[in-house]
Image: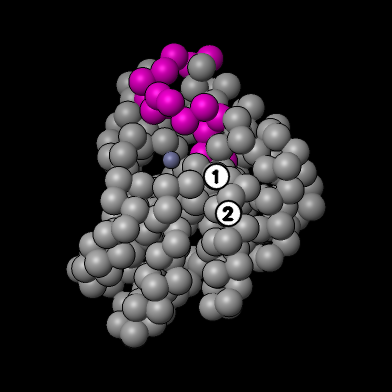
Amino acid sequence: MPKVTLTFDNGPEPLVTPQVLDCLAQHDLKATFFVLGKKVIEPARARIAQRASADGHRIGNHTFTHTTPLGELDRTAALAEFDRTERALEWLLPAGAQPRRLFRPYGGSGALGPHLLHPAVVEKLEAGGYTCVLWNSVPGDWRDPDQWVNRALEDCRSRPWSLVVLHDLPTGAMAHLDEFIRRLFDDGVELTQEYPSDCVPLLDGKIVLPMAQYTSKP
Ligand SMILES: [Zn+2]
């Protein structure tokens, strides 16, 4: 049975994320939300992420400003992108609301490569026992808010386990999330909150895939 893991990046957004949470609850699905530090630092948006966490979804650090991939920043700036977001998520960690500390780098329209990570951040992820979650399916919901579902379904049919990146952003794309989920079930897909191992170069602080492909030179 093919598997699909849903992740939602770049929120929380007050006009979108609660609807995404309602939709996932209707289908009894759990996902992961990779949030931006600059957003979740606002109390109203933090409350949305807290609701997601309480609903059983996982919350991960997706950088603070989400403007330049970490591998293209200097050491200080790269570490700040990570640390400032961790501080905005401090409410999450002591509660033990989720089993893992999660990080997803900013790719720039979903590109994978050595621009993703800075070696100083990799050290930090190792020392802190973080799990780094990448992706293998970026259907471009933000580019094509009304047409992304067919492309996403096609892509999910092309591999045994897809880790899909969607965006809880006010583009209109999430109005079609319910249809996407229904059609995945029609396809006989198993929806899971876990991650395929080829998308996880670091697991609980241990490097499990060659990191050079995702890390800039020091
Ligand atoms: Zn992003």
Q: Secondary structure at mark 2?
A: helix
Q: Earlier in the sequence, mark 2 or mark 1?
A: 1
- Front position in the image: 126 or 1: 1
Q: Is residue 198 visible?
A: no
Mark 1 lies on residue = 11
- Front position in the image: 178 or 125: 178
Quarter that holds the C terminus: top left
Mark 1, other Cα within 10 Å: few <14 / some 14–19 / many ≥20? many
41 inside magenta stretch: no
Residue 60, x across and y down, in percent: 57, 47
Mark 2, other Cα within 10 Å: few <14 / some 14–19 / many ≥20? many
In this picture, which residue range is highlighted in magenta?
60-76
Residue 1, x across and y down, in percent: 33, 83
Quarter of the render that holds ligand 1: top left
The disc placed on residue 186 is: none
The disc placed on residue 17 is: 2
Q: Are marks 2 and 1 in contact (CB under 8 Å)?
A: yes
